[in-house]
Structure formats: structure tokens, C-alpha cells
Amino acid sequence: MADRLADFEKFRADLDGEILECNHLGIKRFFALDHQAYEPGALPTKTKELLGLVASTVLRCDDCVTYHLVRCGEAGWKRQEVIDALNVALIVGGSITIPHVRRAFACMREIDALKS
């Protein structure tokens, strides 16, 4: 289980590095904008990560859900708080998000196992 998360993080880092090394100005700007969106502002980074999780679930992006679940854990969100946020995503996104909520729970199981 922990291997899947480690593989995900490695894959993401490797490919992000390759993407940024292509030196395409538009891509670099978008990646910078994405990073800056999660910096503290009127809302703290912790809140923005939870918002990212909800949006990613509604948009049905499993890679993004995994990314934001890891970041939510690092930001200090408790499991029950994340579950409550996933409930909001389910209500907003409808039944089509159920498979993504399932995968989110599987990912939380992996994250919890790493903490043990």
C-alpha cells in the first residue's frame, strides 16, 4: 500500500520536473499559478487544500484527490474532517462521485498505514 503512494509521489515529481524542463512559458506560468493559489492569503493553506480536495472529487480526478489527501494530512486535517468534506463533494457532485469517494477512502487507509 505504501508503495502506491510512494510511486505516485515519485511519478508526479519526475514528470513535473520533465514538464517544467521543456521551458514552455505558458506551462511554467500555469504551474506557478497553481502553486501560488495554495499559498496563504485570506484563506490559510490548510483550508485551500481541503477546498482542492472537494473540487478534485467533484471533478472526478483521482490523481488530484490523492494529491490533496496527502496534503490535507500534512496540513493537519483530521480524518473525520476530511470525511465531512468528502460528504460535501458527494452532495455537490452527485452519485457519479461515489467511485472517487471510495478511492479516497482507500487512499486514506494507505496514508493512515504510513503513520502507524
Image: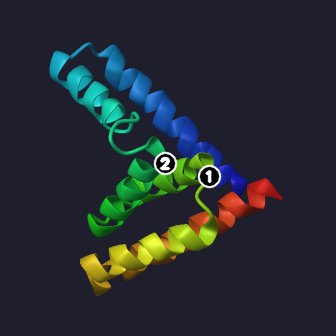
| Of residues 111 and 39, the one drawn nearer to the viewer in this rendering | 39
Q: Quick check: marks 1 and 2 in contact, CB under 8 Å?
A: yes
Please identify the quadrant where the N terminus is shown. bottom right
**Residue lying at 30% horizontally and 25% vertically, measured from the top left:** 32
Mark 2: few/some/many CA within 10 Å (<14, 14-19, 20+): some
The residue lying furthest to the bottom in this view is: 95
Q: Which mark is residue 76?
A: 1
The residue lying furthest to the left in this view is: 26
**Residue lying at 32% horizontally and 41% vertically, measured from the top left:** 42
Please identify the quadrant where the C terminus is shown. bottom right
Q: Quadrant of residue 30?
A: top left
Mark 1 element type: loop
| Of residues 44 and 95, the one drawn nearer to the viewer in this rendering | 44
Q: Left or right of 4: which side holds 37?
A: left
Residue 43 location in percent, x, y? Answer: 36, 45
Name which residue type carries label 1: Gly
The residue lying furthest to the front in this view is: 42
**Distance from the alpha carbon under mark 1 to that under mark 2:** 7 Å
> Residue at label 2?
46
Mark 2 element type: helix
Q: Which mark is residue 101?
A: none
Mark 1: few/some/many CA within 10 Å (<14, 14-19, 20+): few
Mark closer to the chain start, 1 or 2 = 2
**Residue lying at 43% horizontally and 73% vertically, measured from the top left:** 86
Residue 19 location in percent, x, y? Answer: 33, 25
The residue lying furthest to the right in this view is: 116
Q: Please, which colouring scheme is shown? A: rainbow
Residue 109 location in percent, x, y? Answer: 66, 68
Q: Is residue 97 above or below residue 2?
A: below
**Residue lying at 31% horizontally and 66% vertically, measured from the top left:** 60
Q: Quadrant of residue 93?
A: bottom left
Name which residue type carries label 2: Lys
